[in-house]
Amino acid sequence: MLAARTLFLCLLTFAPLIAEGAFSNRRAPGFSLPDATMTQHDPQDYRGKVLLLEFMKTQCPICKVMSGVLEQMKAKYPGQVSVLSVVIMPDTIDSVRAYIKDNGITSPILFDSGQMAASYLKITPQNPTLKFPHIFLIDPDGIIRNDFDHDDAERKMVTAPRLSAEIEKLLKGAPAKKR
């Protein structure tokens, strides 16, 4: 109980900093999550590459469009860009398998219970909402360099050319790492 109170007080203390964007360009939080085949994925496995990390729902129409854009980026930059998508409940293994088949997805879709999503999306008592899709652009050193949320997807449409331009900036500015 004391640990829960301490965590809650820490969240309340740092909430104003988070809301002001003080944690921009932060290190991407670590995780290890399973995909539909129960293979674990960890962002450390993708160091040296640009990682596109997407939070999505299988029933979200905008997410389906974004999945296609992310597949294009993976194909355009083979060996340089990796894509991981993450779902939370109520998505299930069956809904994810159907989504992969119906949409020709080649990148892993991972299952999160919500804790990992909360760390990336800065969920606090003042900001308890998840918006889908949400894409994080993570540089080869594991630093979040940009993110695009649901509102960006609707207003500005995160298109393949727009995302490609952001990836190009990272690839030009970051030295390639040997894996």
Image: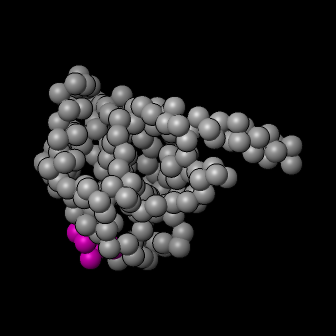
Q: Where in the figure is residue 110, as x and y percent of width and height?
A: 44, 58
- The image quadrant of residue 175 is top left
Q: Is residue 35 visible?
A: no
Q: Which residue occupies 35% across, 40% down? A: 146
Identify the image's colour scheme: rainbow, by chain, secondary structure or one colour: one colour
Q: Where in the figure is residue 141, as x and y percent of width and height?
A: 36, 28
Q: Which residue occupies 19% across, 48% down? A: 162
Rendered position, 170 above or below 81: above
Rendered position, 80 above or below 154: above
The residue lying toward the viewer, choosing from 125 and 46, is 125
Task: Give left or right: position of 47 versus 80.
Answer: right
The residue lying toward the viewer, choosing from 121 and 73, is 121
Q: Main secondary structure of the magenta part?
A: helix
Q: Which residue occupies 35% across, 77% down? A: 98
Q: Where in the figure is residue 70, as x and y percent of width and height?
A: 24, 55
Q: Is residue 143 visible?
A: yes
- The image quadrant of residue 167 is top left
Task: Give left or right: position of 55 versus 176.
Answer: right
Task: Give left or right: position of 136 versus 15.
Answer: left
Q: Where in the figure is residue 131, as x and y percent of width and height?
A: 46, 61
- Taking the view exactly as shown, the residue that stands out farthest to the top is 175
Instruction: Report the number of discs.
Output: 0
Is 103 covered by the magenta stretch?
A: yes
Rendered position, 137 above or below 36: above
The region drawn magenta spans 99-106
Quadrant where the image shows the C terminus: top left
Q: Which residue occupies 55% across, 41% down? A: 19
Is 69 covered by the magenta stretch?
A: no
